[in-house]
């Protein structure tokens, strides 16, 4: 391998690294740094989590039921739940301000607070 | 030498990429600020409730203060809470005679109820005549069978079963809407057939949305949008002069595209969708949705979704169910008979059919 090859490979690697960092940086900028997810159970605030930190939280209830909340890449999603209807699991990941995922059987609401504004005010279901 | 040139080139591309991102962000930030200043100080608020009509209720509004918005939305929520109680078919409430009370007294005695309940039942009966029986609020005996099988099937998917044709046909003998006797003078409702029951699910939510919004309007409220489980309507628009923007949920929940359409709605315009993708259960890998066709006594499967645009939320709600229970051709003919009512059908393969008015409206 010639010296120039090494330089090229090193350059390419650095570029890849910088690109990746740039993407992450972009993502962070696009996710409002103040945005957070408010989890409510039966109307009471259960927890809040920042939207720009990836995490998985299992929300458990006294009756053995549960919902699994995943925050990834600036979006909140319910990935698993004990409820029979699974409407919360089928709901798409949310990230706009005031978007909500609801699990009626578990009386759970997950709402984005302080994120970017959605141009859409309401969706049919 | 050539390789050096390539690396230089790549580095330049990268720098350009970063610059592009920064400029883009800068511009969109400016736009956001500009949009905020146009709205003239009034902030946007949303309140979400999960205690009404077994679904999610959102109120979106613009107000000078959070207190004012909280006050306004409470007026609407209180109204909806009242309707939720008197239209409820599953629960009893202390001191309230509701649809369940009427059902519990079928064949026994007339039940004294509020005028608001009688008005809704009369609206339901009117819907029956207009849709040629495609919506029948007196079909509770059939719907409750499906409800029970669905609940059992969801609780225990491996044991999920279908009701038998005989069971359904037997129940269908007790769905004559003329056996619902309304005495407006005495303010009572009596079901003559003891095996009959009312299920107002196809119209009550939409009817309640219309009543609640009419009430809010009479109280001088403006710039407010109400979404009760997908029954959407609004008073006015956003405070920046633009209109409220509404989206039709994509019935294909696996798709990356969350909406099939998004468009602005005028003051008082109502939108609702009926579909097979939210409430259903599966038996042997086949989906059975909650909308039951009165002709076949089985869930309809002609469409993935039907959406209605109308000036009245109760009509929109009822007609979306009615069209879901009709063939495309019948539905087109039916809807053509109404001014200001438009429809959009999403077929099981995802293709879309619009009435001309719907197409014109969303442009």
Image (spheres, rainbow, N blue to C red):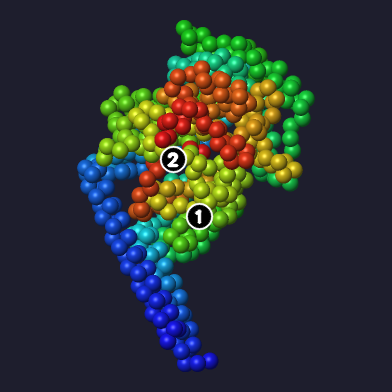
Please name the residue shown 46% across and 89% down the image.
A4
Badge 1 density bin: few <14, some 14–19, many ≥20, Cα 10 Å = many
Does any portion of residue B274 appear in the rendered image? no
On the rendered structure, is B160 left or right of B356?
Answer: right
Residue, disc 1: A77
Please name the residue shown 63% across and 22% down the image.
B139
Q: Are marks 1 and 2 in contact (CB under 8 Å)?
A: no
Q: Farthest residue toward the top?
A: B185
What is the chain letter for disc 2? B
What is the chain letter for disc 1? A
* Residue B214 image point, x, y percent: 36, 24
Secondary structure of the residue carrying numbered label 1: strand
Which quadrant of the structure image shows residue B41? top left
* Residue A91 image point, x, y percent: 53, 48
Q: Is residue A74 above or below residue B208?
A: below
Q: How many marks?
A: 2
Marks 1 and 2 belong to one chain: no
Badge 2 density bin: few <14, some 14–19, many ≥20, Cα 10 Å = some
Please name the residue shown 33% across and 43% down the image.
B45
Q: Is residue B3 above or below residue B348?
A: below
Please name the residue shown 38% across and 59% down the image.
A31
* Residue B123 image point, x, y percent: 50, 17
Name the foreground residue: A40 vs B247: B247
Alpha-carbon span between mark 1 and mark 2: 22 Å
Name the foreground residue: B207 vs B332: B332
Residue, disc 2: B262
Secondary structure of the residue carrying numbered label 2: strand
The disc label shown at residue A18, or none: none
On the rendered structure, is B218 left or right of A98?
Answer: left
* Residue B161 image point, x, y percent: 74, 38
Mark 1 or mark 2, whichever is nearer to me: 2
Does any portion of residue A15 appear in the rendered image? yes
């Amino acid at each position: 391998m010639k010296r120039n090859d090494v330089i090229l490979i090193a350059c390419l690697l650095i570029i890849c690294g910088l690109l990746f960092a740039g993407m992450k940086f972009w993502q962070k900028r696009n996710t409002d740094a103040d945005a957070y997810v408010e989890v409510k159970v039966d109307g009471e605030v259960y927890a809040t989590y920042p939207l720009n930190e990836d995490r998985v939280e299992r929300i458990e209830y006294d009756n053995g039921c549960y919902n699994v909340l995943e925050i990834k890449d600036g979006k909140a999603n319910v990935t698993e739940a004990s409820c029979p209807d699974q409407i919360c699991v089928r709901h798409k990941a949310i990230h706009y301000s005031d978007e909500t995922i609801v699990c009626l059987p578990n009386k759970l609401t997950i709402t984005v607070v302080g994120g970017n504004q959605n141009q859409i005010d309401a969706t049919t279901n | 030498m050539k390789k050096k040139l390539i690396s230089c080139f790549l580095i330049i591309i990268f720098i350009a990429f970063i610059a592009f991102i920064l400029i883009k962000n800068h511009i969109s930030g400016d736009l956001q600020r500009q949009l905020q200043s146009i709205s003239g100080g009034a902030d946007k608020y949303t309140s979400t409730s999960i205690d009404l009509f077994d679904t999610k209720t959102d109120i979106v509004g613009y107000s000078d203060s959070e207190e004012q918005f909280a006050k306004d939305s409470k007026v609407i929520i209180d109204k909806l809470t009242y309707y939720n109680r008197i239209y409820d078919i599953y629960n009893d409430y202390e001191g309230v005679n509701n649809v369940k009370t009427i059902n519990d007294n079928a064949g026994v005695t007339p039940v004294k109820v509020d005028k608001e309940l009688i008005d809704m039942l009369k609206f339901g009966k009117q819907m029956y005549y207009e849709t040629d029986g495609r919506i029948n609020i007196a079909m509770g005996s059939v719907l409750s069978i499906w409800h029970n099988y669905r609940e059992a099937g969801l609780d225990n998917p491996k044991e999920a079963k279908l009701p038998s044709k005989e069971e359904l046909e037997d129940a269908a003998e007790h769905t004559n809407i003329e056996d619902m006797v309304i005495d407006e003078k005495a303010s009572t409702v009596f079901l003559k057939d003891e095996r009959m029951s009312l299920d107002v699910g196809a119209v009550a939510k939409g009817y309640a949305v219309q009543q609640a919004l009419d009430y809010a309007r009479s109280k001088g409220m403006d710039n407010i949008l109400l979404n009760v489980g997908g029954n959407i309507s609004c008073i006015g628009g956003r405070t920046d002069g633009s209109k409220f923007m509404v989206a039709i949920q994509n019935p294909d929940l696996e798709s990356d595209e969350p909406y099939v359409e998004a468009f602005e709605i005028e003051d008082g315009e109502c939108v609702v969708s009926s579909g097979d993708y939210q409430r259903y259960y599966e038996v042997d890998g086949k989906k059975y949705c909650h909308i039951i066709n009165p002709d076949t006594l089985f869930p309809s499967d002609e469409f993935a979704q039907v959406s209605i645009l109308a000036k009245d939320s109760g009509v929109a709600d009822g007609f979306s169910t009615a069209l879901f229970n009709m063939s495309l051709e019948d539905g087109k003919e039916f809807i053509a008979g109404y001014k200001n009512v438009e429809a959009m059908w999403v077929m099981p393969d995802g293709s879309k059919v619009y009435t001309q008015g719907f197409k014109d409206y969303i442009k």
